[in-house]
């Protein structure tokens, strides 16, 4: 009887121990399930910077948009120099400053695009005319800033400003004024701007029609009036602008009558 009672006691202890083990396992499993997201987040936070700085996300290719007249070879050298560098280690602002070191480039934006690409967007200067002084030829903006010849070989169809016509006056102010005239023409009279071959200062505002295109002589003090008269001629009798000769831009009606009457 005592032996049977002892056996039952042992069985009860074993069952109790098994229940305790099962409860402990369940508790450990619950703790793991609850803590897994936290451990995973901390693991990713610690692992991600190492991954971003690895060669897996190194720059392998670059693309450029907006380039027409800047020095493409120089730009290519600057961008090729960072190939193989992890994107996280590339200073996009510093790289943009290097690429922007070109007179034709007004603004540059460099963007790292994972996994391995650099995207470069460029805004170039707008040339308003060719500027000639003897044999020297360069481009000029609407603000009178000089630009070198286009580095990419692309052609520019622009009117010509002859700086030699500005001798005897403040050449800097005269150049700025001439650029303002062309900027005004391009904005207000784009058709006339596209047709004009050359613009110079002269005492008698007139337009010379030749084989290579029309040339405008404007007086620095009343050029807006002269351009308005020329646009009126274009609107009333555009055929007059197809005949070689000279138009007086001071009196539009007289010009039209004179040209019609021969």
Image (cartoon, rainbow, N blue to C red):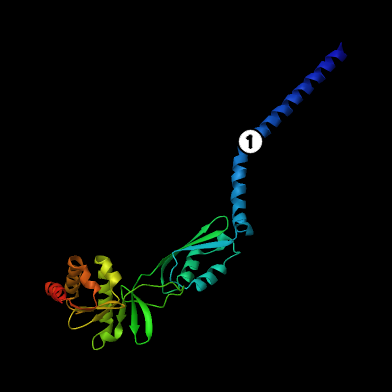
Looking at the picture, tell me which residue is in the foreground, 220 or 93. Answer: 220
Please tell me which residue is depicted at 67% across the width and 33% down the height of the picture: 29
Image quarter for residue 208?
Answer: bottom left
Assess disc 1: are there few (<14), some (14-19) or many (≥20) residues with their C-alpha within 10 Å of its C-alpha: few
> Residue 167's x, y, as percent?
26, 88
Q: Which residue is mark 1?
A: 33
Image quarter for residue 25?
Answer: top right
Looking at the image, which residue sits at the far top?
1
> Residue 21's x, y, as percent?
74, 28
Left or right for 147, reference 169: right
Please tell me which residue is depicted at 28% across the width and 82% down the height of the picture: 172
Instruction: Locate the C terminus and report the quarter of the image it occupies.
Output: bottom left
Q: Identify whether 64 is placed above or below 6.
A: below
> Residue 58's x, y, as percent?
60, 60
Image quarter for residue 183?
Answer: bottom left
Please tell me which residue is depicted at 19% across the width and 75% down the height of the picture: 223
Instruction: Locate the N terminus and report the quarter of the image it occupies.
Output: top right
Left or right for 54, reference 183: right
Looking at the picture, tell me which residue is in the foreground, 222 or 55. Answer: 222
Looking at the image, which residue sits at the far front?
262
Label 1: state its secondary structure: helix
Left or right for 15, reference 191: right
């Amino acid at each position: 009887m005592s032996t049977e009672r002892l056996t039952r006691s042992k069985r009860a202890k074993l069952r109790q121990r098994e229940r305790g083990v099962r409860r402990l396992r369940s508790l450990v499993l619950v703790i793991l399930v609850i803590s897994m997201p936290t451990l995973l987040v901390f693991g990713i936070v610690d692992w991600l910077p190492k991954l971003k700085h690895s060669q897996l996300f190194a720059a392998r290719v670059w693309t450029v948009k907006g380039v027409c007249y800047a020095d493409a070879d120089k730009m290519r050298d600057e961008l090729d120099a960072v190939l193989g560098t992890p994107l996280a280690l590339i200073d996009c602002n510093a790289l943009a400053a290097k690429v922007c070191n070109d007179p034709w480039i007004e603004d540059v934006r460099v963007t790292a695009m994972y996994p391995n690409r650099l995207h470069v967007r460029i805004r170039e200067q707008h040339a308003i005319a060719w500027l000639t002084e003897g044999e020297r030829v360069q481009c000029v903006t609407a603000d009178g800033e000089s630009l070198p010849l286009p580095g990419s070989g692309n052609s520019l169809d622009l009117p010509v400003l002859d700086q030699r016509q500005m001798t005897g006056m403040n050449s800097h102010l005269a150049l700025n004024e001439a650029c303002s005239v062309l900027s005004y023409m391009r904005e207000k009279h784009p058709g006339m701007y596209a047709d004009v071959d050359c613009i110079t200062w002269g005492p008698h505002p007139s337009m010379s029609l030749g084989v290579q295109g029309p040339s405008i002589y404007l007086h620095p003090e009343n050029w807006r009036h002269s351009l308005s008269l020329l646009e009126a001629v274009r609107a009333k009798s555009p055929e007059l602008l197809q005949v070689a000769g000279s138009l007086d831009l001071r009196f539009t009606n007289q010009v039209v009558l004179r040209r019609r009457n021969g």
